[in-house]
Image (spheres, rainbow, N blue to C red):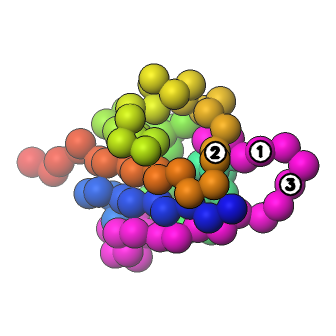
Amino acid sequence: YCYPISLGGAELLFDGVKEHQVTLPSQSEPWDMKQLLVWIQRNLLKERPELFVQGDSVRPGILVLINDADWELMGELEYQLQDQDNVVFISTLHGG
């Protein structure tokens, strides 16, 4: 399965790359968002993980969209990814 992942405003934590096409390894159960976040931390996140994750979720101030819908409507960490789901992380945190 392939998943487009966009990082609006958070790309500096990912070597300045704003969009990634992610192919996740096969596993017996479908991938969920919690597993995707762990995979992103291990494979894409290059610096300052505390600015992207907090505990096992995204930190407050990171808006997550799945196929243009707020992930809170989709089940958040439990949402099971479907092939070609478009996942977007938007940082609403701004320096002052």
Q: Answer with mark 3 or mark 2, whichever residue precedes in sequence.
A: 3
- Label 3 belongs to which residue? 27
Task: Answer few, some or many: residues within 10 Å of disc 1's Cα (few below 14, many 20 plus, some between 14 and 19).
Answer: few
Helix, strand or loop status at disc 2: loop
Seen as rendered, the residue at the extreme right is 28
Tell me if I can see residue 45 in this picture: no
Choose top left, top right, bottom left or bottom right for residue 73. Answer: top left
Question: Could you give the CA–CA distance between mark 3 and mark 2, rounded to whole angstroms?
Answer: 12 Å
The disc placed on residue 81 is: 2
Residue shown at the point (38%, 74%) measured from the top left: 17
Is residue 24 highlighted in magenta?
A: yes
The disc placed on residue 30 is: 1
Q: Quadrant of the N terminus?
A: bottom right
**Relative side of 78 to 64, left or right:** right
**Relative height, residue 69 to residue 37 (above, below):** above
Task: Answer few, some or many: residues within 10 Å of disc 2's Cα (few below 14, many 20 plus, some between 14 and 19).
Answer: some
Residue 70: x percent and y percent? Answer: 38, 32
Helix, strand or loop status at disc 1: loop
**Relative height, residue 53 to residue 75 (above, below):** below
**Relative height, residue 21 to residue 73 (above, below):** below
Tell me if I can see residue 87 in this picture: yes
Residue 58: x percent and y percent? Answer: 48, 40
Seen as rendered, the residue at the extreme left is 96
Residue shown at the point (62%, 33%) measured from the top left: 79
